[in-house]
Amino acid sequence: DRPDINQAVAKKIESARGEIFKPALSFVRDTLVLLGVLDVRKTYNRGTSSRDNNEMLSMEETYFVEASRGRRETVDEVITVHQDIHQEYGEYLTKFSADTTYCTIVEQHEKRWNSVIVDSCSADYGNENEASYVVQMLPWNTIRANRFREAASMLAEKKFLNGRLQALGVLEGTTAQVTDAEELVLRYFDKKNAILCFESIDPDQMMLNAYERTRKDVTRQVEDLDNADDDGSGDQPYRHRLKRLHIATGKALHLMGVSLGAQGFVEEELDFCKQALLLKRKSAFGPSVTISDTLHCVGYSLDSSGRYLEALEFYNQALAIRRTFLGDQDLRVAETLHNKGAILCENGGCDDAMVCLEEALEIRVGLYGDHHESCADTQQWIGNVMREWGKFDEGLTYFQIALKTKKAILGADHDEVANTLQNMAVILDDMGKYMLSLDCYNEALRIYTLQFGREHLRVTDTLQRIAIDYMILEKEEEALDYFKQTIELREKLQADEMCGLSDPISIVRSLIYPDEMDIDEVLGRFGDIVECYEEALQLTRRLKSDDHSSLSIFLHRLGDLYFETLNY
């Protein structure tokens, strides 16, 4: 609304970029002054003498020094200014790609500045503005100061959580918990911070602890109100309040469940979402969109766990509600149709799968246009159905369209691009076009290695597929080399996964006592390695001789593997 002010701010930012050192606060403060919302002219007259020399400290240096000393006046100023920035101008600090933001400048000094904020809040907060700031933003500042253990403890600490839920409410408070927990996990594993010396914590366990504490607190509130109204005699306002709390708590549990699922905690996601579903149904007089959202998430959790028939049941319930309340052209209808179609495709129901996938694609194209990532996902699954039907040319066309879209949107090095390349390679194998297939496999291998490192299951699977193609092409030297690479990596991954249970005695014990380890899981760990050894053994015999020294290594290890899988 104020182009002249915006231009002035942009000009200020551009001029600041050439500075070698200026704490971020000075730029943010000047911006607030330019925008006319903060008058700090009096602070320029407040200098502080340095102990090391007679020079006067700048305003921003004074903030750092006095806040770290815990001076009450400065602490209040720091919190007030930072709260104003967060409330009114946070968007300018979060849009990383825009030149009209201070994000780059802030990042240069974020650890120092955020440490000041955390230290300023370490004492009991003494005013309403400070208390509001603490429950909303203090964990975020603590994470940005790279004080991860402190942040993890705060998110699971009873006093802090109670204060956050009371100040923000059940749903908004839980949303803040989820935002902070996900930020901690992301920040901890951020590649750009790998060179820093971080505190040693388990961020996944931190997330579980924070969510379990949050679940305990929010469900206790519901139980207390339920118990107070056991006879159903509460007045109408009380009943409305109870219903709103049921809905808010259901949504809060749903949110935490989805967050856990995104981190790979599938069973925990299922547990949270089922509890959310119970609360939502208890608060509603019938089906609703919010109930359909949780039904869909329960279906997704079951899908991820391989419990496909149960997943289909929940998807069908979600789909019926979404069609009723949202209509046939809603994106959430397309989402459920897509997931249902994928399950049907994987379990042999290709005809029904195609009906679901084509309708999902029609909805998505109608609302997004042809070139959208979700459209590419559905096109890729249609390609899978075509492959199952033996329509290889049509399937390949769908994969090529999906690949082009994903490259354009996600970039050439994204793992989703590699997944599509894998699908293309498989269908090219079916068509007997092995050289083209190898091109796809090799590009997928490059991307997987770049994204996940060498020691990853997707890398080993791709190496084994390359080895098999070279064998079919009768390029036995190349095939043997790739089988050896695959064996080396699979052995390493198996050893890491078994956590000390890779010796035969432990494996047999796990088979005798199935409660300690799933039998199918144990046997399945060795199948791919056995296949690689068997192929490498045959190739070595053909390329070398029956007396070659490497044969004894292969034969010995094969004997171990056969024993471990009880193939006596």
Image: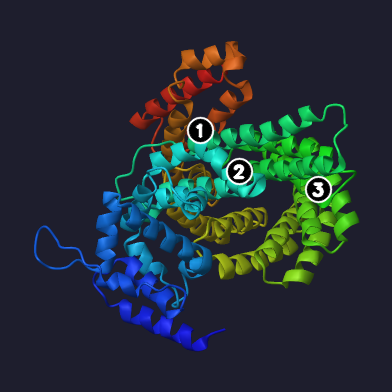
Measured as percent of width and height from the top left, residue 138 is found at 45, 49
Which residue is the site of mark 1?
Answer: 529
Q: Is residue 531 left or right of residue 80?
A: right
Classify 10 Å Cα crowding around label 3: few (below 14), some (14-19), many (20 and above).
Answer: many
Which badge, 3 or 1, comes first in the chain's sequence? 3
Is residue 499 left or right of 435 when viewed as pictured?
Answer: left
Assign a secondary structure to mark 3: helix
Residue 290 visible, this orientation:
yes
Q: Which amino acid type is shown beneath numbered disc 2?
A: Gln
Mark found first going from the N terminus, 2 or 1: 2
Please identify, in this view, whether the residue under mark 2 or under mark 1 is nearer the observer.
2
Q: Residue at x 54, y 39 (%)?
A: 161
Left or right: where 95 falls relative to 386: left
Of labels 3 and 2, the one closer to you: 2
Which of these two is toward me, 109 or 207? 109
Q: Secondary structure at mark 2?
A: helix
The answer to whether the residue labelled 3 contacts the one labelled 2, judged by CB atoms less than 8 Å apart, is no
Residue hosting label 2 = 166
Q: CA distance from mark 3 to mark 1?
A: 43 Å
Can see residue 262? Answer: no
**Whether residue 87 is situated above or below residue 244 in the rendered picture:** below
Q: Quadrant of residue 282?
A: top right
Which numbered disc covers residue 292? 3
